[in-house]
Image (tube, rainbow, N blue to C red):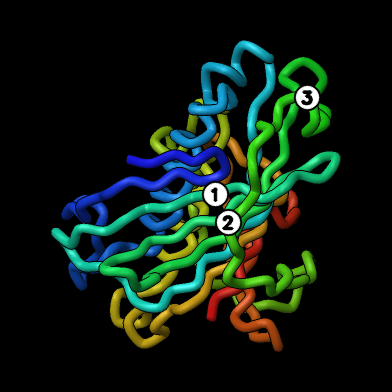
Amino acid sequence: MADKGCKYSTELKILPSMCDDTSMLGIASVFDIFQDYATLHADMHDIGPEGMHRRKTFWVITKTRININRLPIVMDDVEINTWIQPADRASCERDYSITMNGETLVYGRSIWAVMSRETGRLVPMKELYPVVDFDEPRPDEKPFARAGKTFDEADELGSYTVRSTDIDIGGHMNNVHYIRAMLNCFSTAKLKEMNIKEVEVNFISQTYEGETLTFKSRRTENGLEIGALNSDGKTVFIAIVN
């Protein structure tokens, strides 16, 4: 394990519980790993779960994109890296990578903000962001895509009712469970055919136990855009898959 302020690195063995039917690391598990190791790094700077609870604040992730060169397979030994970028007034960015033998297998980029548990408002980053040397390069400067939030004319993929096992400590559907529910709209054969190399997600609003989400898709210049709509027809999650 290594920590040099803005960056945290550690080794990880890819276990069967992380893998899909191909014995490769599952796409949803990539998102799990990135969020979990972001938490470990944040905890080193007292802005992990305990520190945020003490401040009556919590982290929210708004956007994430992963780029897949290739996925590791079961029992591979890989290195997980995560590092932070300089923050602006109300948000910050965090990068991630999964590497093996010097090769970058997966790269990720995300945008985070902090909310007050008491007011529900954004907390200025200067109140808690660590003072470190930001000396880690960013391999991909491509901006996040823009996707329309209206899916009225899109094709319906399927629906999903939020269950108790989808709920996280915040009392709402865990971010990665949106991705699992979305991927479950496709068969294993279809997912192999899609050969997904990039997934970008935008978490828009919260969903709670018992709510039903309807997934719709459309093909645009961005790629395959997939929206999750709640019972009121409001889009709560958007993914762009390529």
Instruction: Determine which quarter of the picture holds residue 106.
Output: bottom left
Instruction: Determine which quarter of the picture holds residue 6.
Output: top right
Mark nearer the viewer, 2 or 1: 2
Q: Residues within 10 Å of mark 3 (few under 14, many from 20)?
A: few
The answer to whether 170 appears left or right of 222 in the picture is: left
Find the distance from the CA under tag 2 to the CA under tag 1: 7 Å
Q: Check whether the beta carbons of the residues at disc 2 and disc 1 lie within 8 A of each other.
A: yes
Residue at 50% in and 27% down: 43
Mark nearer the viewer, 2 or 3: 2
Say which of 136 and 119 sits in front.
Answer: 136
Residue kind at label 3, given as amino acid type:
Glu
Q: Does the image show residue 106?
A: yes
Q: Which residue is mark 3?
A: 127
Q: Which residue is mark 1?
A: 83
Residue kind at label 1, given as amino acid type:
Trp
x and y percentages locating residue 28 in the rendered image = 40, 58
x and y percentages locating residue 93 in the rendered image = 67, 51
Residue at 48% in and 36% down: 41
Q: Earlier in the sequence, mark 2 or mark 1?
A: 1
Q: Does the image show residue 122?
A: no
Q: Residues within 10 Å of mark 1 (few under 14, many from 20)?
A: many
Q: Which residue is mark 2?
A: 136
Question: Which residue sits furthest top?
Answer: 54
Q: Secondary structure at mark 3?
A: helix
Q: Is residue 75 above or below residue 53?
A: below
Residue at 83% in and 31% down: 124
- Residue 100 is marked as none
Find the distance from the CA under tag 1 to the CA under tag 3: 19 Å
